[in-house]
Amino acid sequence: MTTDKAVDLKNERNRTSVLRQLTALQTMSSEEIDNKWRDLYGSEPPRYKKTFLQRRLAFRIQELFFGGVEPPVRDKFQELAAHDPSATRLERPRTILNDGKVLPGIRFIRVWNGKIYETIARDDGFEFNGQIYRSLTAIATAITGTKWNGRKWWGLPDSKKSSVQ
């Protein structure tokens, strides 16, 4: 009976430690994030934005405490990915044609002021909230209430600099 209580107490302390580490990630500097990465992954951190590294570290902290994906499940994922051309693709899929136009069917997702916005490229424009707009700029302006370069707001490269992605 006392060993059950000791195990429960130890698990609760570990859970508290995990929560404390997850909370601390939010206030860490970039240098602290890099050091945490080295501690948890044993390698140099990749050159990504701080928020991406924080999310990956949060996953790693939980993975180490709660355990990762079970080996049979991981094996099944790898088997499925081996037969999926999009999972084994090394380069980024094209989203823009040579003339700078966006390929129909491309979905854009953007978070603005805590809300998620989504639009889909169509042959005749861009669909947003069931309505077709002529440009990404019109949608960005409708969402923000101010004039924006739609390509920039949705995260596309400048069509003059890079026409193929």
Image (tube, rainbow, N blue to C red):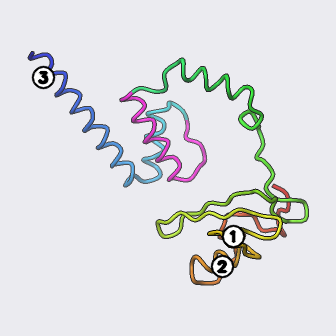
Residue 51, relative to residue 56: is it above or below?
Answer: below
Q: State the residue in front, 105 or 148.
A: 105
Alpha carbon distance from label 1 to label 2 = 8 Å
Residue 48, relative to residue 6: is it above or below?
Answer: below
Which residue corresponds to the image point at 46% horizontal and 27% vertical from the top-left? 68
Q: Earlier in the sequence, mark 1 or mark 3?
A: 3
Residue 138, relative to residue 48: is it above or below?
Answer: below
Q: Which of marks 2 and 3 is nearer the N terminus?
A: 3
Which residue corresponds to the image point at 69% horizontal and 79% vertical from the top-left? 138
Residue named by callout 3? 5
Q: Image quadrant for the N terminus? A: top left
Residue 65 numbered tag: none
Drawn side of residue 81 relative to residue 13, left or right:
right
What type of secondary structure mainly makes up the magenta span? helix
> Residue 153, position in %: x, y?
65, 70
Hey, what amino acid is under mark 1?
Answer: Lys
Which residue corresponds to the image point at 45% horizontal and 35% vertical from the top-left? 60
> Residue 132, position in %: x, y?
72, 73
Say whether residue 129 is magenta.
no
Alpha carbon distance from label 2 to label 3 = 59 Å
Residue named by callout 2? 148
> Residue 142, position in %: x, y?
61, 79
In the orientation shown, which residue stands out farthest toward the right?
99
Hey, what amino acid is under mark 2?
Answer: Trp
Residue named by callout 1? 152
Q: Specify start and end residues of the magenta stretch as a single range.
A: 44-66
Alpha carbon distance from label 1 to label 3 = 56 Å
